[in-house]
Structure formats: structure tokens, C-alpha cells
Amino acid sequence: MQDEQRWTRSLQGFVVLNLQKMASKEKPRIAIILSASAEWKTALSEFNNTLVVPSPIGDHFTATLAGRSCLFFHGGWGKVSAAAGTQYIIDHWQPDLIINIGTCGGFEGLVSVGEVILASETVIYDIIERMGNPRKAIEHYTTRIDLSFLRKLYPHPVKIGRLVSADQDIDPTMVTSLSTDFSTVAADWESGAIAWTATRNSTRVLILRTVSDLVSPAGGELYDQGDFHDRAREVMLPLLQSLPAWIECALHG
């Protein structure tokens, strides 16, 4: 029995190693990061018949968009996975462009479900500094994104502005302060970490987040009810389908 288990593990290791080698041959120059499981599953269903390869950080596959080989990478949810996944991609594939697409929560009355936020700046707001200037701590993880490489006109209607990130869904009691203090209309979990890591590596980054749900001081429309996975699929599909046009927009700016 032990010999059989050892043989099975060896075979699995051999298969994974060769899948990784096959996937790395093309060296895709564009990497597309998806974070939440619902976003990743939507991409898998949209680009079916793909070879999904595991890695220590997240699964990935390649697909041809706009005539170019693109890496789709499941970076995972939260800042830790987002930063690790971004660095892993840069170290292994050295992409010319990283695109992060996904969902975000919007502030009710300031944005609508289905609107796409094109991030010009990201802020990580769940940093608490009690022994120094808290504003400096926030500024350290604030990333201004150069969008000058994008060609006008954009292929999809967008709202350009700041996205704020934290390892939490939007706290209804913070909606007013977040929108006022940071002049933003939406928040997510990962974009701040992705933008910060990519910028530190001098890698161009494009972040497109579609509003999946609305939060007000009274609560969130999908909190404790509704199905985020269904909503995520609904709003993600148009964004996934517009990816080839965004790639053309980015490479021919």
C-alpha cells in the first residue's frame, strides 16, 4: 500500500511538473489576475477547454486574446494572496502588463451595479498606526497608477478614480467616512496590494473592477442575503468579453 501511494504521489508530481513546463513555453507577456473564487470560476467557464496548471500561489491557464498569449492567474482573495500572486507572476513570467479584473463594492447613491471602475489610484485603508502619523502609513501604501499608456477612446464605459482596499467587506458604518476621506465610490480587497507590488517592480498595471453590490450606512444589499456568486458572474461576463479590446487599447496607446 505504501509503495502504491508513493508511486501515485510521484506520478502526480511528474504530471504537475510537465504541465507547468508546457504552460511556460509560450511566455505570455500579458498577465490577468482574478482574485475571488467567484471571479475565477466565471473566467474558467468563459474560456472553457483550457489546461489549468497549479502553482504554490494559485492556479493558472493561458488563452489567446487579441492575437496574444495571455496568462490567467487565480491570485486569491485578500492582500496577502494578492501581493504574493503579483510577485510570483512577475518573477516567473516578467509580463509587460498586468491586468487585474474583478468585482468591488460600491457606495449606494454614488455608483450603480455594473459600472466599471478604472483605477487611477489605490489606497489600502485598514492600516492602524498608533505610534506615529497614521496618515503617513496610509500614504506609504497609496499607489498612483499611470494610465497614459492607454489609448483613447476606452473600449468600455468606465468611471475613473480611486479604489480603496482592505481585508474586509465594506463596513456600513464606514461608508460615509470612506467616501469623504478618500474621495472614492467603491472598495475591494486586493487592488491596493496588486498595484503597489506591480509598481514596485516597474510593471505596468491596469485595474478594472465592476461594481457587484451596493453598501449604505444601513447595510449591504447582499450581506446576509442574496448570492454573491450569481451577481459576480452577471457583472463579470461583460468585463471578460471586453478584455481583447482593453488589451488592444493598452498595447496601442
Image (cartoon, helix red, strand yellow):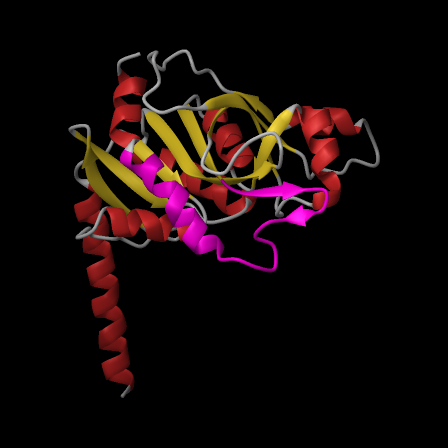
Residue 37 visible in the displayed image? no
The residue at the far bottom in this view is 1
**Which residue corresponds to the image point at 30% horizontal and 18% vertical from the top-left?**
249
Does the segment drawn in magenta span residue 108? no
The image quarter in which residue 135 lies = top right
Q: Is residue 235 left or right of residue 168?
A: left
| Residue 72 location (% of width, % of height) | 30, 42
User: Which residue is more in the foreground, 37 or 171?
Assistant: 171
Q: Quadrant of the C terminus?
A: top left
Q: Is residue 168 above or below residue 151?
A: below
Residue 109: x and y in percent read 62, 32
Q: Nearer the viewer, residue 60 or 155?
A: 155
Q: Position of residue 113 (x, y in %)?
A: 49, 38
Task: State the residue at coordinates (73%, 26%).
Answer: 181
Q: Which residue corresponds to the image point at 55% horizontal and 33% vertical from the top-left?
A: 192
Q: Is residue 249 visible?
A: yes
Q: Quadrant of residue 17?
A: bottom left
Q: Which residue is located at x 69 percent, y 45 percent?
A: 171
Examine the rendered structure and indicate whether residue 43 appears above or below residue 149. below
> Relative to the observer, which residue lies in front, 38 or 69?
38
Q: What residue span does the magenta drawing correspond to?
A: 212-241
Residue 172, quarter of picture: top right
Q: Is residue 220 magenta?
A: yes
Exactly how many numbered labels are in the figure? 0
* In this picture, residue 165 sits left or right of residue 67: right
Which quarter of the rendered picture does the N terminus lie within? bottom left
